Amino acid sequence: MISNHQIYNEGKRRLMDAGHSDQTALLLMNEICSHYGINLYMEMDDPINPAVQIDFLEAVHEMEKGTPLAYVLGYENFYGYDFIVNENVLIPRPETEELVGLVLQLCDEYFEDQDHVSVFDVATGSGAIGVSLALEEPKMDVIASDISKEALQVAYLNNQKLNSSAIFVCGDMLEPFIERNLHCNILVCNPPYIPSEEEMEHSVVDFEPHVALFGGKDGLKFYRSLLKNAHKVLLPGSIMAFEMGYDQAKRLSQLVREYFAEAKIQVHKDMSGKDRMLSAWIKDPKSNTDSEPYSESE
């Protein structure tokens, strides 16, 4: 009889031929086996369950065509939580986990004495940022938005699955918050920031939603839209935190300064040492005067 090991070796060979790492097949097969209550590591040389064989080889076939592993499995781990993902949402990246960590740090730094901190997560996608923040910091009152109803359906499922307290509204960038006259202490956003002309990997361009990837000719389209209206939702002494492209720090800093001359701007590096996040403390959203010294690192 055919063993788990034999089918695993076949899948490993095919996936490596398709450009995947040598660990991908093991991860895939282990996840499928777990679904059937099988401990792959203990039963590697046992006869394979026919259902496991079918599911594994079908998944290998999908990945040979370029389908990302997360879409094949139906989830991606983010900040220690398994988030449902499908073709309607961007697969959350490790860099975005660092944005969540930054927001939690800024919350401790600026709002330690507050019992409740209102947080807007704009362009939430799968809900990874907003749901994770609500789970990690109970005093955060998170409202997340997205223009895509299909994406919000995924985010809502994740919210239910993980027992999070986040609330969701549908609309373009800040519009749903402005319409409801809502205001926040923290505005976090990981918008589409890839320039429209930039070449991307086949597995990204062909399978992940373009609306969640591309940010216009220079990649800053959605930051402009957000910053133009941010003063309408920010409370005094509020924080904005963005993920960005590794080469966008200077341009995004200048853009923030155009709308908030008094902002205290900081650029934060990711674990790879690349400029990846930008935060801005806004003393008075209604004012355009620089009454406080600011620090800016690039």
Image (cartoon, rainbow, N blue to C red):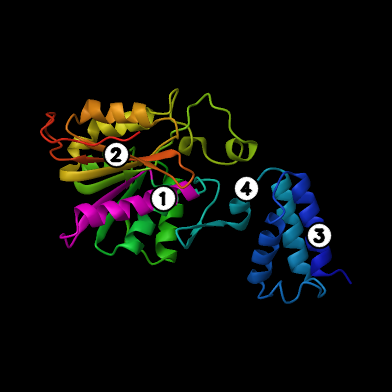
| Residue 22 among magenta residues | no
Which numbered disc flags the more N-terminal residue, 3 or 2?
Answer: 3
Residue 96, x across and y down, in percent = 43, 48
Determine which residue is flagged by label 4: 68
Look at discs 3 and 1 and give the one toward the viewer.
1
- Answer with mark 2 or mark 1, whichever residue precedes in sequence: 1
The dot on residue 270 is none
Q: Position of residue 114 (x, y in %)?
A: 16, 59
Q: CA distance from mark 3 to mark 2?
A: 48 Å
Disc number placed over residue 266 in the picture, else none? 2
Residue 21 in view (yes/no): yes
Q: Tell me whether the residue at label 4 lies in contact with that at label 1, contact meaning CB atoms closer than 8 angstroms.
A: no
Span of residues in magenta: 94-123
**Hey, what amino acid is under mark 3?**
Asn
Q: Point out residue 203 in the picture as x, y percentages from the top left corner.
A: 63, 40
Q: Circle 3 is placed at which residue position? A: 9
**Tag in front: 4 or 3:** 3
